[in-house]
Image (cartoon, coloured by chain):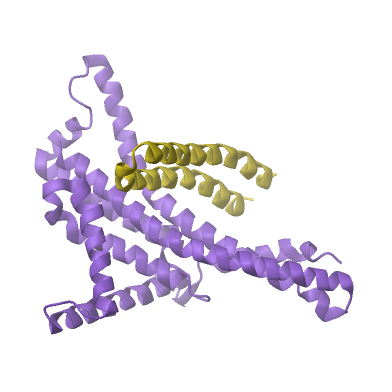
Chain colours: A purple, B yellow
Amino acid sequence: MNPLDKLSGEMEELLDGFMTQTVVGDTTVGLTNYIFWMCVALALLVITVFLFKKMQAKSLVPQGIFVNGMELVVEFVRDDLCESILGETWKKHFPFLAALFFFIVSNSIVGVIPGCHPGTGTIGVTAALALCSFAYFVVLGCRRMGVAGYIKSLAPKGVAFPMNLLVWVIELVSTFLRLVTLAVRLFCNMFAGHVVMGTFAILATLFVEPLLQEFSLVALGYVGASAFWVVLLIIIYLVEILVGVIQAYVFTLLSAVYIQIVENE
Amino acid sequence: MGVIGYGLGVIGASVGIGMAAFGATTSMARQPEVQGRLFTTFILASAFVEALALIGFVVTLIAK
């Protein structure tokens, strides 16, 4: 009996597990499993931030691994994401960008705990995040240049008349495409990573099964393969933690770049 | 069939990510001072390319 025969059936079950299920209420008013884990991540984030503020106020010099670590992360967001891209105007946008970064990171960290889901693993949450970022830079542009001025500024200056319109249409489409790509990139990374992790976990269990039914040399060989899958699973798990942080970085970086484009008009 | 389609789609993404890594390593070897700034650009470029491959993966799983 080949353990791989059962894989497609198990995969269906795994994918069903990743679909949105309601925990409380129904689909219009209620709590789905992803939103539940998002609330857990948000609660953890709020607790961490308030604990950090409290411990930081204790002494002038930061002490302990927790306070120093948090300060390192905040300074990383400030220097690498805000100041290096936005220049002098970074102070105005730092709260928004830091909120985005920490929200996505806390969701990714909750998501890699076995049994939990990442809040960003559903398209609804990432679309809402992308909409926040999109609304932020569009409103900023409208405030700086006026609504008509912002719409006009999409086309670069110094292009001759007929080409002007064409470039403007392309830029308009690409502005709305930013919304889609921001949402889809984060969702796909989270979803695909967790599906791959689940697949390796299923493979590891399927390859042990023959030994439980009858003892043979082939079954022992399958157990060896199972150990290999477990090693791969651990590697993928570590990669998934890295991907969660990198995706938060990319999301925040792109938001900062879009804001910078508007600021420099 | 969907799995074969995903395999075909990944060819482009793998070439793209390989070229990004090639460019980054070559320029880092030539000019080690720009390592910090190059790393940001490299991560950004690979995230763009990687997203395409992942969209293929997710579409394969969802749309059967």
In the rendered structure, the answer to whether residue B1 lies left or right of residue A133 reads right
- Residue A79's spot in the image, x, y percent? 21, 55
Closer-to-camera residue (B21/A82): B21
What residue do we see at 25% from left, 59% from top? A77
What residue do we see at 22% from left, 62% from top? A75
Q: Which quadrant is the N terminus of chain A positioned in?
A: bottom right
What residue do we see at 22% from left, 15% from top? A160
Residue A76 can be seen in this image? yes
In the rendered structure, the answer to whether residue B11 lies left or right of residue A111 reads right
Name the image quarter holding residue A109: bottom left
- Residue A257's spot in the image, x, y percent? 26, 45
Q: Is residue B19 above or below residue A53?
A: above
Q: Which quadrant is the C terminus of chain A positioned in?
A: top left
Q: Is residue A78 above or below residue A160?
A: below
Closer-to-camera residue (A211/A132): A211
Residue A198 can be seen in this image? no
Name the image quarter holding residue A209: bottom right
- Residue A162's spot in the image, x, y percent? 26, 15
- Residue A174's spot in the image, x, y percent? 34, 36
In the rendered structure, the answer to whether residue A195 lies left or right of residue A82 reads right
Count of marks, rendered view: 0
Closer-to-camera residue (A31/A81): A81
In the rendered structure, the answer to whether residue A140 lies left or right of residue A11 reads left
Q: Is residue A265 above or below residue A101?
A: above
Q: Is residue A165 above or below residue A216?
A: above
Name the image quarter holding residue A70: bottom left
